[in-house]
Image (spheres, rainbow, N blue to C red):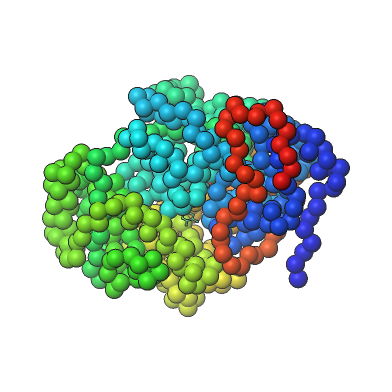
Amino acid sequence: MSRPRPAVPPDTTRSLERTIRGRITTDAVAIAPFGHDASHVTGRPVAVVAPTDPDDVVELVRWARRTHVPLVARGGGTSLDGESVPADGSVVVDFSGWSHLLEVDPDGLWARVEPGIVNRDLQRALLPHRLFFPPNPGSWTASTVGGNVGTNASGMRSFRYGPTRAWVREVEAVLGTGSRVHLGSRVAKRSVGPDLLQLFVGSEGTLGIATEVTVRLAPVPAVRHGVIVPVPRNASLGPLVVGLTRVPDSGLSAVEYLDRGSAAALAEGRKARWPRDSSLLLLEVEAGGPDEAERRISRLRGALAKMGAADGFAVFEDADELWTLRGACGDVLIERYGQHVREDVAVPLARVDALVAELERIARKERVPFFLFAHLGEGSLHPNYAVDPATSAANRIRAATLHAARSLGGTISAEHGVGRVKRSFLTEELGVSAVELLWAVKRACDPDGILNPGKLYPTLARPTRRPSRSPLGWEGGRVRTGSPNAGRSPFPLRSPPGGGRRRRAARP
Ligand SMILES: Cc1cc2nc3c(=O)[nH]c(=O)nc-3n(C[C@H](O)[C@H](O)[C@H](O)COP(=O)(O)OP(=O)(O)OC[C@H]3O[C@@H](n4cnc5c(N)ncnc54)[C@H](O)[C@@H]3O)c2cc1C
């Protein structure tokens, strides 16, 4: 039986309308897509707002502090652990209209952007400068820079370039106190105490709301080739990757892995032109020109041949097409099996094979089909178990998977974040004292607990010093079935910065 939608009392809605200049919608149909992200959990927001400018965000936060209505910043809504799923009764802050590239400094290698700019749109806008923003998650066609910062997203090329954390120079944000802060600096080196910017990256919208981001850029390599290599049956993955990483001057920027089932699912579901009967390594090789690319590729081929893994080695000219295909792997499995358990763990390379064996054992024990794709070069694995993620079997599988990664010296989240789904596992990884420290940071930035409650921070057995008035302990919400499509904004695009700032927009 579906529960009634929580409603903001009419006087609260009216006070919201009086407070911000941006648009507000409470229409049930328009706000429904904002109740979920790409995970299986859902929430029931009471309104979606599109602030006009940073001052509007300040007013919105002040309003939320007065009324104790939670706010959830939202980019593309592609999170996989409920990071952007609102707690029941929240107001979603929709940044999809904040999608402008504000400034590029090609010599300083930085760009200033609005947080709602979609990753791929930023890459396209940077191309004329022969520059790019290296984090390229599989969701790059829909996820935003604000969301990438919120989850510290990585991508296929983070083998070479690292996660979003390494590519953010500055963030302008409104904290949960209502204060505006400027975090970070445009300079390449800085030593002025602990790095507050890095506290913000990966904070899942729980400390502040980013209104502007300055990202670091890299020159686009002259040549980028994809390479596909079938992995011989029974080959050990760890030594294979270590062997690849030791090839001198290889230009390797991505070392990805698809197990046999995932490769076959993509060949069928997305017409990928690769073998269906083998697990695959997908590589990217960068070079300054065609000759260097050829030399590098032949060096890699030689190294793989020595490891008995060069049969079927093939060059795939368009590396981005390869990554778009690889990014669709999760979706193809959803098309086939519906929502299922999709995990995101990492271990040191020396432990990869032990972890894979343990994951397969878990799947066998629970008698569920198992698929694995991975950012293998970093020991970052995405095990997929074809089981309804809301069942008790799913809970057992998730717990066993996270525990296996931890017990092999790894982490419960390599790149997707903690969100709602994994917050109860965080203490196992960080320890009680570190979680208390995390809560102290949270309380300093968001004393009333109005920013994205119910995410990231686990409930501690011993009470935290000051109980919050917000629903921070919120664990509820229903389970969603069907497509994980991200919510679409009920608002048309925001006008470019500077245009129509002080105008009150019409209600949608
Ligand atoms: C098909 C698919 C492939 C994926 N592949 C990858 C991958 O390869 N690597 C990877 O790391 N992830 C991947 N993801 C997960 C997801 O896309 C990333 O976590 C991404 O960074 C989320 O961006 P978003 O714009 O959708 O953010 P949202 O889901 O909207 O939000 C993510 C978090 O950031 C916060 N946030 C958003 N905007 C702001 C803001 N302005 N200020 C403060 N906080 C904000 C939100 O509150 C939330 O906590 C994938 C997801 C899908 C569906």
Coordinates of residue 89 in the picture (x, y in percent): 75, 51
Q: Nearer the viewer, residue 266 or 101?
A: 101
Residue at 36% from the left image edge and 38% from the top image edge: 127
Residue at 52% from the left image edge and 35% from the top image edge: 100
From the viewer's perspective, is residue 484 above or below residue 9? Answer: below
Residue at 59% from the left image edge and 62% from the top image edge: 40
Residue at 48% from the left image edge and 21% from the top image edge: 192
Is residue 488 found left or right of 290 in the rendered image?
right
Is residue 73 found left or right of 247 in the rendered image?
right
Coordinates of residue 272 in the picture (x, y in percent): 33, 65
Please state, as top left, top right, bottom left or bottom right, where the N terminus lies in the image. bottom right
Residue sticking out furthest to the right: 11
Is residue 118 found left or right of 236 in the rendered image?
right
Coordinates of residue 33 in the picture (x, y in percent): 64, 56
Q: Nearer the viewer, residue 254 or 108?
A: 108
Q: How many marks?
A: 0
> Residue 4 is drawn in which quadrant?
bottom right
Q: Nearer the viewer, residue 122 or 387?
A: 122
Is residue 154 found left or right of 435 in the rendered image?
left
